[in-house]
Image (spheres, rainbow, N blue to C red):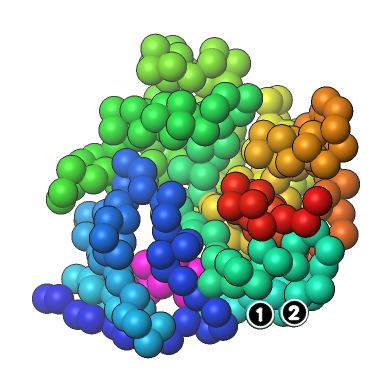
Amino acid sequence: MTLELAVRPRGPYSLALSARLASDATRTFRDGLFTALLAVDGRPELVRAWQSPDGAVTIRAESPPGGERMRWILALDNDHSDFLRAVRDDPMLGRAARALRGLRPLRVATVAQALLRAYCGQLIEAKLARRLEQTIIRTICPEGGERLHLAPTTAELAAVAPAQLRALGLHTRRSASLVRLCRTVELERLHDVETAVVAARLERERGLGPWSIGVVCLQGLGRYDYGLVGDLGLVKLLRALRGRPVEGWETAELLEPYGQWAGLASMYLLAGHSRGLLAA
Protein backbone atom coordinates (compact mmCIF):
# COMPACT_ATOMS: atom_id res chain seq x y z
CA MET A 1 0.00 0.00 0.00
CA THR A 2 1.19 3.51 -0.86
CA LEU A 3 -0.33 6.65 0.56
CA GLU A 4 0.27 10.35 0.05
CA LEU A 5 -0.07 12.91 2.80
CA ALA A 6 -0.32 16.59 1.86
CA VAL A 7 0.92 18.76 4.72
CA ARG A 8 0.73 22.51 5.01
CA PRO A 9 3.74 23.40 7.21
CA ARG A 10 3.01 25.53 10.22
CA GLY A 11 4.77 28.82 9.69
CA PRO A 12 7.39 29.67 7.06
CA TYR A 13 9.05 26.55 5.68
CA SER A 14 11.46 25.75 2.87
CA LEU A 15 12.41 22.13 2.23
CA ALA A 16 15.11 23.29 -0.18
CA LEU A 17 16.79 25.39 2.52
CA SER A 18 16.27 22.93 5.36
CA ALA A 19 17.38 19.77 3.53
CA ARG A 20 20.20 21.26 1.46
CA LEU A 21 22.92 19.51 3.47
CA ALA A 22 20.80 16.71 4.97
CA SER A 23 21.96 13.77 2.85
CA ASP A 24 23.72 11.01 4.78
CA ALA A 25 23.82 7.21 4.86
CA THR A 26 20.10 7.05 5.74
CA ARG A 27 18.63 9.64 3.38
CA THR A 28 19.16 11.78 0.29
CA PHE A 29 17.98 15.11 -1.02
CA ARG A 30 18.26 15.45 -4.79
CA ASP A 31 16.41 17.68 -7.23
CA GLY A 32 13.90 18.67 -4.59
CA LEU A 33 13.09 15.08 -3.54
CA PHE A 34 13.84 14.01 0.03
CA THR A 35 14.09 10.21 0.44
CA ALA A 36 14.68 8.43 3.75
CA LEU A 37 14.85 4.81 4.85
CA LEU A 38 12.97 4.53 8.13
CA ALA A 39 12.34 1.68 10.56
CA VAL A 40 8.56 1.39 10.88
CA ASP A 41 7.00 -1.37 12.99
CA GLY A 42 10.16 -3.44 12.76
CA ARG A 43 10.60 -3.21 8.99
CA PRO A 44 12.39 -0.82 6.62
CA GLU A 45 10.23 1.65 4.74
CA LEU A 46 11.22 4.11 2.04
CA VAL A 47 9.48 7.44 2.55
CA ARG A 48 9.70 10.40 0.18
CA ALA A 49 8.77 14.07 0.42
CA TRP A 50 8.74 17.10 -1.84
CA GLN A 51 7.45 20.66 -1.67
CA SER A 52 5.08 22.23 -4.16
CA PRO A 53 5.33 25.86 -5.33
CA ASP A 54 2.35 26.69 -3.11
CA GLY A 55 4.35 25.60 -0.04
CA ALA A 56 2.57 22.31 0.69
CA VAL A 57 4.79 19.30 1.40
CA THR A 58 3.68 15.94 0.01
CA ILE A 59 4.84 12.83 1.84
CA ARG A 60 4.62 9.47 0.08
CA ALA A 61 4.89 6.48 2.42
CA GLU A 62 3.92 2.84 2.66
CA SER A 63 2.09 3.29 5.97
CA PRO A 64 0.56 6.06 8.13
CA PRO A 65 3.30 5.66 10.80
CA GLY A 66 5.95 6.09 8.11
CA GLY A 67 4.32 9.30 6.94
CA GLU A 68 4.05 10.65 10.47
CA ARG A 69 7.66 9.79 11.17
CA MET A 70 8.78 11.72 8.09
CA ARG A 71 6.58 14.62 9.16
CA TRP A 72 8.50 14.78 12.45
CA ILE A 73 11.92 14.46 10.78
CA LEU A 74 11.11 17.37 8.46
CA ALA A 75 9.87 19.47 11.43
CA LEU A 76 6.75 20.43 9.49
CA ASP A 77 4.69 21.17 12.60
CA ASN A 78 7.33 23.11 14.54
CA ASP A 79 6.36 26.68 13.74
CA HIS A 80 9.27 29.01 14.46
CA SER A 81 7.43 32.25 13.71
CA ASP A 82 7.95 33.46 17.29
CA PHE A 83 11.71 33.16 16.79
CA LEU A 84 11.55 35.08 13.51
CA ARG A 85 9.58 37.86 15.18
CA ALA A 86 11.96 37.95 18.13
CA VAL A 87 15.04 38.42 15.92
CA ARG A 88 13.48 40.50 13.13
CA ASP A 89 15.32 43.63 14.27
CA ASP A 90 18.26 41.89 15.88
CA PRO A 91 21.47 43.72 14.86
CA MET A 92 23.35 40.47 14.33
CA LEU A 93 20.77 38.00 13.08
CA GLY A 94 17.93 40.10 11.68
CA ARG A 95 19.03 40.12 8.05
CA ALA A 96 19.76 36.38 7.99
CA ALA A 97 16.43 35.58 9.65
CA ARG A 98 14.56 37.57 7.02
CA ALA A 99 16.46 36.02 4.11
CA LEU A 100 16.37 32.43 5.43
CA ARG A 101 12.99 32.51 7.18
CA GLY A 102 11.97 29.06 5.87
CA LEU A 103 15.02 27.31 7.34
CA ARG A 104 14.42 24.70 10.05
CA PRO A 105 16.92 22.12 11.34
CA LEU A 106 15.89 18.65 10.21
CA ARG A 107 15.95 15.76 12.68
CA VAL A 108 17.62 12.38 12.28
CA ALA A 109 15.58 9.21 12.65
CA THR A 110 17.03 8.11 16.00
CA VAL A 111 18.64 9.79 18.99
CA ALA A 112 21.40 7.21 18.62
CA GLN A 113 22.29 8.61 15.20
CA ALA A 114 22.45 12.11 16.64
CA LEU A 115 24.78 10.88 19.39
CA LEU A 116 26.97 9.09 16.85
CA ARG A 117 27.06 12.29 14.78
CA ALA A 118 28.12 14.24 17.84
CA TYR A 119 31.01 11.91 18.61
CA CYS A 120 32.12 11.81 14.97
CA GLY A 121 32.06 15.58 14.68
CA GLN A 122 34.17 16.50 17.65
CA LEU A 123 37.14 18.67 16.69
CA ILE A 124 37.30 17.56 13.04
CA GLU A 125 36.26 19.14 9.75
CA ALA A 126 32.57 18.69 8.88
CA LYS A 127 33.08 16.71 5.67
CA LEU A 128 35.41 14.25 7.39
CA ALA A 129 32.98 13.88 10.27
CA ARG A 130 30.06 13.14 7.94
CA ARG A 131 32.15 10.61 6.02
CA LEU A 132 33.08 8.85 9.26
CA GLU A 133 29.44 8.72 10.36
CA GLN A 134 28.42 7.25 6.99
CA THR A 135 31.15 4.61 7.17
CA ILE A 136 30.02 3.46 10.61
CA ILE A 137 26.32 3.37 9.69
CA ARG A 138 26.97 1.49 6.46
CA THR A 139 29.03 -1.05 8.37
CA ILE A 140 26.71 -1.81 11.29
CA CYS A 141 23.17 -0.95 10.08
CA PRO A 142 20.90 -2.89 7.69
CA GLU A 143 20.70 -1.72 4.09
CA GLY A 144 17.39 -1.17 2.32
CA GLY A 145 16.14 0.36 -0.91
CA GLU A 146 18.20 2.77 -2.99
CA ARG A 147 21.36 1.76 -1.11
CA LEU A 148 20.23 3.61 1.99
CA HIS A 149 20.70 2.24 5.49
CA LEU A 150 18.51 2.37 8.55
CA ALA A 151 19.60 4.78 11.27
CA PRO A 152 21.45 3.11 14.16
CA THR A 153 19.51 2.22 17.28
CA THR A 154 20.77 2.41 20.83
CA ALA A 155 20.94 -1.41 20.91
CA GLU A 156 22.98 -1.60 17.71
CA LEU A 157 25.57 0.87 18.95
CA ALA A 158 25.66 -0.84 22.34
CA ALA A 159 26.44 -4.15 20.64
CA VAL A 160 29.45 -2.82 18.74
CA ALA A 161 32.89 -3.39 20.21
CA PRO A 162 34.76 -0.11 20.75
CA ALA A 163 37.69 -1.64 18.90
CA GLN A 164 35.51 -2.00 15.79
CA LEU A 165 34.56 1.66 15.92
CA ARG A 166 38.22 2.52 16.35
CA ALA A 167 39.09 0.43 13.31
CA LEU A 168 36.50 2.39 11.33
CA GLY A 169 38.13 5.68 12.30
CA LEU A 170 36.52 6.90 15.54
CA HIS A 171 38.96 7.93 18.27
CA THR A 172 39.56 5.31 20.94
CA ARG A 173 38.17 7.29 23.89
CA ARG A 174 35.14 8.43 21.90
CA SER A 175 34.45 4.86 20.79
CA ALA A 176 34.51 3.61 24.37
CA SER A 177 32.37 6.49 25.63
CA LEU A 178 29.76 6.06 22.89
CA VAL A 179 29.36 2.35 23.50
CA ARG A 180 29.29 2.76 27.28
CA LEU A 181 26.56 5.38 27.09
CA CYS A 182 24.43 3.26 24.74
CA ARG A 183 24.78 0.33 27.12
CA THR A 184 23.52 2.35 30.08
CA VAL A 185 20.84 4.67 28.62
CA GLU A 186 17.97 3.94 26.25
CA LEU A 187 18.42 7.07 24.22
CA GLU A 188 14.92 7.23 22.75
CA ARG A 189 13.52 7.74 26.25
CA LEU A 190 15.20 11.14 26.30
CA HIS A 191 12.27 12.40 24.21
CA ASP A 192 10.25 12.37 27.42
CA VAL A 193 12.84 14.29 29.47
CA GLU A 194 13.23 18.07 29.75
CA THR A 195 16.20 19.58 27.96
CA ALA A 196 17.93 20.71 31.16
CA VAL A 197 17.75 17.18 32.55
CA VAL A 198 19.01 15.69 29.28
CA ALA A 199 21.94 18.10 29.29
CA ALA A 200 22.80 17.37 32.92
CA ARG A 201 22.78 13.62 32.24
CA LEU A 202 24.94 13.83 29.13
CA GLU A 203 27.38 16.26 30.76
CA ARG A 204 28.33 13.47 33.17
CA GLU A 205 29.67 11.40 30.28
CA ARG A 206 33.33 11.71 29.51
CA GLY A 207 33.89 13.28 26.12
CA LEU A 208 30.49 14.98 25.79
CA GLY A 209 30.57 18.75 25.94
CA PRO A 210 28.10 21.53 25.09
CA TRP A 211 28.46 21.17 21.31
CA SER A 212 27.77 17.42 21.37
CA ILE A 213 24.78 17.92 23.65
CA GLY A 214 23.52 20.59 21.27
CA VAL A 215 23.65 18.15 18.36
CA VAL A 216 21.68 15.56 20.33
CA CYS A 217 19.07 18.12 21.40
CA LEU A 218 18.69 19.82 18.02
CA GLN A 219 18.89 16.89 15.62
CA GLY A 220 17.99 13.93 17.80
CA LEU A 221 15.27 15.39 20.01
CA GLY A 222 14.06 18.29 17.89
CA ARG A 223 14.64 20.89 20.62
CA TYR A 224 15.39 24.54 19.81
CA ASP A 225 16.50 25.64 23.27
CA TYR A 226 20.05 24.28 23.50
CA GLY A 227 22.72 25.92 21.35
CA LEU A 228 25.74 24.56 19.51
CA VAL A 229 28.31 26.10 21.85
CA GLY A 230 31.80 25.47 20.52
CA ASP A 231 30.77 24.79 16.93
CA LEU A 232 33.79 25.43 14.69
CA GLY A 233 31.67 27.59 12.41
CA LEU A 234 30.66 29.77 15.36
CA VAL A 235 34.28 29.92 16.48
CA LYS A 236 35.23 31.27 13.03
CA LEU A 237 32.39 33.79 13.19
CA LEU A 238 33.38 35.04 16.64
CA ARG A 239 37.03 35.21 15.60
CA ALA A 240 36.07 37.42 12.65
CA LEU A 241 33.92 39.63 14.88
CA ARG A 242 36.60 40.08 17.56
CA GLY A 243 39.66 40.06 15.36
CA ARG A 244 41.54 37.64 17.60
CA PRO A 245 41.75 33.93 18.37
CA VAL A 246 38.84 32.68 20.51
CA GLU A 247 38.07 29.54 22.48
CA GLY A 248 35.03 27.37 21.84
CA TRP A 249 33.39 28.22 25.15
CA GLU A 250 33.34 31.90 24.21
CA THR A 251 30.70 31.19 21.54
CA ALA A 252 28.17 30.86 24.34
CA GLU A 253 28.20 34.66 24.37
CA LEU A 254 26.90 34.67 20.78
CA LEU A 255 23.93 32.50 21.74
CA GLU A 256 23.10 33.92 25.17
CA PRO A 257 20.84 36.72 23.84
CA TYR A 258 18.56 34.20 22.15
CA GLY A 259 17.57 32.28 25.28
CA GLN A 260 14.98 29.59 24.53
CA TRP A 261 15.86 29.82 20.82
CA ALA A 262 19.60 29.23 21.24
CA GLY A 263 19.60 26.04 19.16
CA LEU A 264 17.70 27.60 16.29
CA ALA A 265 19.83 30.73 16.51
CA SER A 266 22.90 28.52 16.13
CA MET A 267 21.62 27.27 12.78
CA TYR A 268 20.73 30.76 11.54
CA LEU A 269 24.09 32.16 12.63
CA LEU A 270 25.94 29.39 10.81
CA ALA A 271 23.81 29.64 7.68
CA GLY A 272 23.89 33.43 7.73
CA HIS A 273 27.64 33.58 8.19
CA SER A 274 28.26 31.18 5.28
CA ARG A 275 26.11 33.40 3.03
CA GLY A 276 27.46 36.75 4.20
CA LEU A 277 24.13 37.75 5.77
CA LEU A 278 25.29 38.68 9.26
CA ALA A 279 25.86 42.20 10.45
CA ALA A 280 29.46 42.93 11.39
On the image, the x and y values in percent for residue 132 come to: 42, 27
Kindly report the distance in space between the C-alpha atoms of the residues bearing marks 2 and 1. 6 Å
**Image quadrant for the N terminus?**
bottom left
166 falls in the magenta region: no
Identified by mark 2, the residue type is: Arg
Query: Percent position (x, y) of residue 147?
Result: 18, 43
148 or 82, which lies in front?
A: 82
Numbered range of the magenta stretch: 67-76
Which is more toward the observer, 187 or 249? 249
From the top left corner, tell me how far across and down residue 238 is, in percent: 80, 40
Q: What element carries label 2?
A: helix
Q: In this view, does 217 lie above or below 70?
A: above
Residue linked to disc 1: 81
What residue is rendered at 70% in x and 66% in y?
A: 95
Residue drawn where x is 68% and y is 26% of the image: 207
Residue 163 in view here? yes
Q: Is residue 230 above or below residue 51?
A: above
- Secondary structure beneath dot 1 equals helix
| Residue at (37, 67) in percent of width and height | 70
Which is the main secondary structure of the residues drawn in magenta? helix
Residue 262 appearing in the image: no
Query: Can you tell which quarter of the image residue 84 is in?
Result: bottom right
Residue holding disc 2: 85
Q: Do the residues labelled 2 and 1 touch (CB within 8 Å)?
A: yes
Looking at the picture, does residue 99 appear above or below residue 53?
above
Horizontal side of 59 relative to 93 (left or right) equals left
Mark 2 surroundings within 10 Å by alpha-carbon count, few (fewer than 14), some (14 through 19), many (20 or more) = few
